[in-house]
Amino acid sequence: MNPPYEVPMSAGVPGATLDQVLLCPPNDSKAVEVALERGDVAAVILEPAGGQAGTTPTVPGYLQELRALTARHGVVLIFDEVITGFRYSPGGALCGKRALMGMLAFRGDPDWDRSQRVAHAGTFNANPLSAAAAIATLELCADASLQARANKMGDELRRALGEAMKRAGVPGACYGEASIYHVSFEGKPGLAGFDRPRKGPHYHLLRCALLNNGVDCSANHGWISALHTEEDLERTVQGYERAFRAMVADGAFKGA
């Protein structure tokens, strides 16, 4: 999501839906504690590495504080690990307490299966080909060597992109963790995230400039695979630098 967070990102989202959600600033355990003291919170959900794949990173100790707070209040703590699972470490499998995960299971009881069970729909559910591919992938990820290699390349790419920004005269920074990188024209975020509006039009221009220079990725961040090579990284940095220089030549950062 992008700010302002209290406004729906799309038409068709009922206001009643937002009424059921409480938002807390990132890395602010006190704000979470105040919210939980209401007594009507069912669950706390967040990306463990930080919002939007670590765009606003989680500070050390925050997750442990959340675990203690939610346990004390009897509230479920949910980690959204679509991106962080298996990327930061070999762990990260879908797991949870039996009482909760059992709510998803079919029991062969028509009443339970139809009206009491919590539905868990998915594009690849019960797909043998996807399951076989997942098992083969997890076997390769199990010893952490692929993560270590991708993380090392992440360090290299972040450093190289930061240098490319300086050479091109582009404001901002490149930061991130593990094998994830973020290009930010505002600089690195503070503990509470970015304290000023994001430069949305600039990221759109970057996306267009990258496509013109042979790099296909998100507007402001990306993920390194264990299969990427040094040549891939070099080609990526070259594409970014050409894109940065094109933006500068078009006057994108005048007055920045």
Image: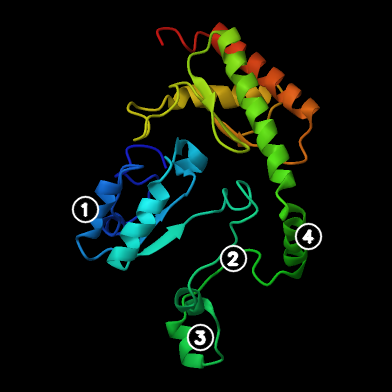
Residue shown at 36%/54% (left/top)? 66
Residue at 47%, 81% (x, y): give it.
117
Q: Earlier in the sequence, mark 1 or mark 3?
A: 1
> For the residues marked 4 and 1, what is the alpha-carbon distance in whole angstroms?
44 Å
Q: Which residue is mark 3?
A: 113
Q: Quadrant of the C terminus?
A: top left
Counting from the top left corner in percent of width and height, residue 109 is at 52, 93
Tell me the mark number nearer the camera, choosing from 1 and 3: 1
**Mark 1 → mark 3, Cα distance in angstroms:** 37 Å
Q: 62 or 41, which lies in front? A: 62
Residue drawn at 38 percent across, 48 percent down: 11
At label 3, the amino acid type is Asp
Can you say whether 124 is above or below 52 in the image? Answer: below
Instruction: Classify 10 Å Cα crowding around label 1: few (below 14), some (14-19), many (20 and above).
Output: few
Estimate the x, y position of residue 170 in percent, counting from the top left: 52, 12
Which coloring applies here? rainbow
Amino acid type, mark 1: Val
Q: Which residue is mark 1?
A: 34
Q: Which residue is mark 2?
A: 122
The residue that label 4 is drawn on is: 136
The residues bearing labels 4 and 3 have C-alpha atoms spaced at a distance of: 31 Å
Label 3 – label 2 distance at C-alpha:
17 Å
Query: Which badge, 4 or 2, is on the more N-terminal residue?
Result: 2
Real-space Cα separation, disc 4 to disc 2, in angstroms: 20 Å
Of callouts 2 and 1, the N-terminal one: 1
Against 149, residue 41 (above or below) is below
Specify whether 146 is left or right of 198. Answer: right
**Disc 2: CA contacts within 10 A as few (<14), some (14-19) or many (>=20):** few
Q: Is residue 216 visible?
A: no
SS type, badge 1: helix
